[in-house]
Image: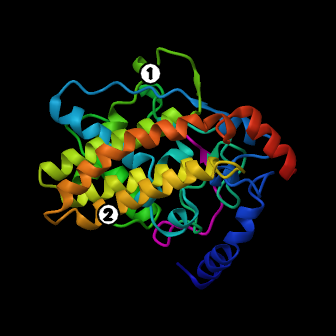
Amino acid sequence: MDRRQARTRLLIVAALPLLLAAASDSPDLPIKEARWLAPGQVFDGLTRQPAECFAPPKFPSYRASAPIGRAAFRAPLLLGGQAARVGLSCASCHRNGRGNAEFAFPSLSGHPGTADVTSSLMSKKRGDGAFNPKAIPDLAGAASERTIARDPGRLDLWTFIHGLIVDEFDGHEPPPEVLGGLVDYVRALSPAACRGPASVAIRLDGNLADVDAAMQSAGQSWRTGYPATARFLVGAARSTLGSIDERFQMPGLERGRAQLHAADAQLRAIQDAISSRSAGTRFREWQRDWPRRKIALRKQERQSLFNPVVLRRRLAEVGP
């Protein structure tokens, strides 16, 4: 990188907080995803998303691996640098493994639904100092539109995803099981699995199911001797709890937030104990307490920002 490019990157990074404040027509909304949704499309982007076109792999090893990748795909902790700081995940651009027509991140997007994958804002390694956003592809799109081969007998997809994490977004080297899971998850996305409605509502139960899936994979990884992967997956579950908490930032929902904070404390305790003898006890405590916490959260969903009526009212309050 020459001196001019380096200076450009430093200026962009320094301006990041201001860019994020301008990224949404509702900067005071507590939902971080609103920051990178195009003005005028925040309500739609926060209430619906493309349907996930995922077909569980047939082979048992792939069937166990793909859920690990699915959880990692939705976890901001997978990426590094500025992406991690603002909470971006793979799913921020590829919602439910698809695309994101509303994605509009300052200095990263051109028109909504585009992103510059060689932006100096996100990468010290691949930043080219030029602004060249491209359309975000649908990962469940037609095979003829893919630029990366998904043949299990080739390493193209593995190499691409690895480079995206550690080079494009300056992320840490992921555990091998996480990287393999990401490859298996993306391979399991296909047009043939798109059999239902084109879009689905964003609801609390979807987030709770993501927590359950991440913790199921975490427990399995711990039991089979992969503590780093288990710790990562528990972190993914904590990220999802944080996303739920954002939508519970409303008056009268203090009890629900207390449940979320207590659940997060349990998950942190599991992460801290993952390599010790007490890990099993921590997992069992989670399995004992989490079902009743879910019941308490569901009772308050109608008052939260998961409710489209409440969300629309909140958007009207914060204004453009």
Residue 185, image x and y in percent? 34, 37
Residue 164 left/right relative to 221: right
Near-viewer residue (83 or 261): 261
Answer with the quarter of the image where residue 281 lies: bottom left
- Magenta span: chief secondary structure: loop
Q: Which residue is mark 1?
A: 191
Residue 28, image x and y in percent? 77, 58
Is residue 261 something that shows in the picture? yes
Label 1 SS: helix
Q: Which residue is mark 2?
A: 269
Q: Which residue does the image show at 76% across and 53% down from the upper left? A: 24
Is residue 137 something that shows in the picture? no
Q: Which residue does the image show at 64% across and 38% down from the upper left? A: 306
- Which callout, 1 or 2, points at the residue further toward the start of the chain? 1
Residue 263, image x and y in percent? 42, 53
* Within-10-Å neighbours for mark 2: few <14, some 14–19, many 20+: some
Residue 125 among magenta residues: yes
- Residue contact between numbered discs 1 and 2, judged by CB atoms under 8 Å: no
Q: Gap in Å between the C-alphas at discs 1 and 2?
A: 40 Å
Magenta highlight range: 123-138
Image vertical order of residue 75 relative to residue 69, above or below:
below
Answer with the quarter of the image where residue 55 lies: top left
Label 2 SS: helix
| Label number found at residue 208 | none
Near-viewer residue (198 or 130): 198
Q: Which residue does the image show at 59% across and 68% down from the upper left? A: 121
Q: Amino acid at mark 1?
A: Pro
Image vertical order of residue 147 relative to residue 176, above or below:
above
